[in-house]
Amino acid sequence: MKNYKIVIQYDGTRYDGWQKQGNTKNTIQGKLEDILQKMAGIPVEVHGSGRTDAGVHSKGQVANFHIDTKMSCEEIRDYINEYLPKDIGVLSVEVVHDRFHSRLNAIGKTYEYRIVTSKIPHVFEKNYVYQYGKKLDVQAMRQAAIYLVGEHDFLGFCSLKKMKKSSVRTITSIEIEEIEDEINIKITGNGFLYNMVRIIVGTLIEVGIGDRKSEEIEEVLTKRDRQLAGFTAPSSGLSLLKVYYNS
Amino acid sequence: MKNYKIVIQYDGTRYDGWQKQGNTKNTIQGKLEDILQKMAGIPVEVHGSGRTDAGVHSKGQVANFHIDTKMSCEEIRDYINEYLPKDIGVLSVEVVHDRFHSRLNAIGKTYEYRIVTSKIPHVFEKNYVYQYGKKLDVQAMRQAAIYLVGEHDFLGFCSLKKMKKSSVRTITSIEIEEIEDEINIKITGNGFLYNMVRIIVGTLIEVGIGDRKSEEIEEVLTKRDRQLAGFTAPSSGLSLLKVYYNS
């Protein structure tokens, strides 16, 4: 059996997220496993680098699986793409060393969040942005973002009330770009808690609209209280952009 | 009553084209007229610059209508956008002189057609491109396009067998650009027959894949025979980009 690493894009709009859960097969993982089972003749488990929630997109999700096949990597890619629905696509397939695990070996991830600040609808991007429709103070948002960069306990930016494991994570960068009527936020870190990116974005939007001060971010971090943070920004604007590995 | 000119974008995927027809209200024109009737309190007729077929998109369709209102142009735009589904959006509203008619005064149009030549699915663009999946000879396509530019009888590139009026049109330019795994064709002319752009694109694709020679284009033009032209490329790849007016 060889270990294959794949990079996958998907428009998450129609799906219940990445991860197979209970009886629903309407997940990205579920779709991939169905096709690989057909290809390999036996059940195949696909390990993703992490979950993405219902409605969240991916431009670079990474997964791996073990199968025994004589097909080349390109043939595997084309086979999977032929059977996948049009809103999921495999960009690349490569053989990796046997112990590579897309989740356990991931050292970081970049997420992207897109906000449209004008009232004019972006009809071709409707499923990929948050159509907020109001001007935001990007300078204030950048100021607030500075408080988040670094190693912190992000429990206040997590939808789960209790974490079994540590809720300490490191955010290595937050880039906020404004291009015409769109604000693009890229957040890179070594790991993210449940809904963490969307709550960070919601909090930054509240800073940008003038409903809260940048300094309040510090309080959310020290008090670790979800109630003190902002709203959870909608899933449509969020994409997993890239997953990082050593070497 | 004032005469208003609007510029509209739409993702045509879910619609039966621009024009209201019989009982179906599932057209862009139908959606706009419903909202304007609600706004004005009386039926309003919306004149488009021309039809777009089912599944065809617009980045710059132009229409006009006469209403009596105290609302500003910006208020009208925001009102319409609030009631429109997310896949239709009004970019701008302006008052124009009383005799302006978006179809009768149009002097030209540019259409864009997008072809993906790789097998890798473009998941975020799936509704806006033709996922052809094979390499095309762009130089040969450009060579073939030269035969089409100028004033010709385009009946051979029309799905209707007979035209009540003249089938002579002028194509002023065909630009074919290749960017990574996408070929983008922009066709500008003073008017287009039914399915003309899609049949031109289908014929250029057959030249690009090596199934026919560029010189055959000349025969289609002189013999005016639809059977001699190529296939009708799918609607998903086609967008009305711009409509031109004098002054």
Image (spheres, coloured by chain):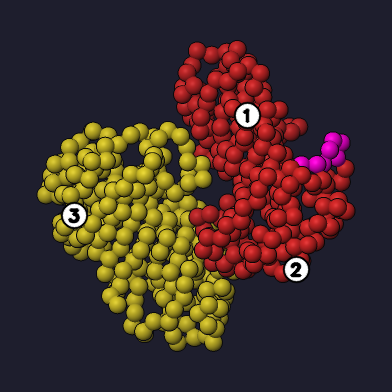
Chain colours: A yellow, B red
Determine the residue positioned at 58% across, 20% down: B96
Q: Which residue is mark 3?
A: A149
Q: Are marks 2 and 1 in contact (CB under 8 Å)?
A: no
Determine the residue positioned at 17% across, 41% down: A214
The part of the chain drawn in magenta is B163-169
Asked if residue B177 can be seen in this view, the reply is yes
* Chain at tag 3: A
Check disc 1 and report its element: helix, strand or loop: loop
Check disc 3 and report its element: helix, strand or loop: loop
Residue B165 is left or right of residue B95, and the answer is: right
Residue B13 is left or right of residue A91, and the answer is: right
In the rendering, at what x and y percent does residue B178 appear? 56, 60
What type is the residue that disc 2 sits on?
A: Asp
Nearest to the eye among marks 3 and 2: give it: 2
Q: Give above or below for A167 relative to B188.
A: below
User: Could you tell me which quadrant the C terminus of chain B lies in?
Assistant: top right
Q: Quote the CA–CA distance across marks 3 and 2.
A: 57 Å
Determine the residue positioned at 48% across, 68% down: A91
Q: Quote the CA–CA distance across marks 2 and 1.
A: 41 Å
Q: Quote the CA–CA distance across marks 3 and 1.
A: 54 Å
Q: Which residue is mark 1?
A: B246
Whether the magenta-drawn stretch holds residue B167 is answered as: yes
Residue A2 is left or right of residue A194, and the answer is: right
Figure quadrant of residue B102: top right
